[in-house]
Image (cartoon, rainbow, N blue to C red):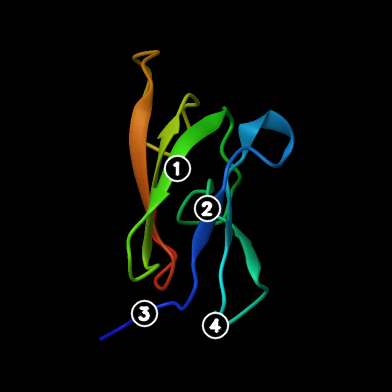
Amino acid sequence: MRSIVGAVVVPAVLAGGAVLVLAGQVAGPPAVLVSVSSKGIQGDGGSSDAAVTPDGLYVAFRFDGTNLVKGDRNGQTDIVVRDRVTGKT
């Protein structure tokens, strides 16, 4: 089973409301920006109300931009989920 030790969400730390996740044992830096596309492009809107699963693998958050959800042009807030192992949003 995959897991990430000690994952916690730090809300709206970066300019533009980007969401950061701080984690213990992660293959990479301990602070990881999760409000990015699957290609690693930062979200073009604010992010808020983040929640992380108990195993630290997934982070869900509200997103007010348009570039994290394919074809999103409705002007509504979306709920986005980022897989911290695969990097898929």
Mark 3, residue position: 3
Disc 3 residue type (three-letter): Ser
Q: Distance between the residues labelled 1 and 2?
A: 7 Å
* Residue 70 seen in the figure: no
Q: Distance between the residues labelled 4 and 2?
A: 15 Å
Mark 4, residue position: 25
Q: How far apart are marks 1 and 4 (CA)?
A: 20 Å
Q: Distance between the residues labelled 3 and 4?
A: 9 Å
Q: Mark 1 and 2 residues: CB-CB less than 8 Å, in contact? A: yes
In the figure, 57 relative to 71: above or below? below
Q: Which of marks 1 and 2 is nearer the N terminus?
A: 2
User: Measured from the top left, where is residue 49 in percent x and y?
Assistant: 45, 35
The residue drawn where x is 33% and y is 35% is 79
Q: Earlier in the sequence, mark 3 or mark 1?
A: 3
The residue drawn where x is 33% and y is 60% is 53
Q: Quadrant of residue 4?
A: bottom left
Mark 2, residue position: 9
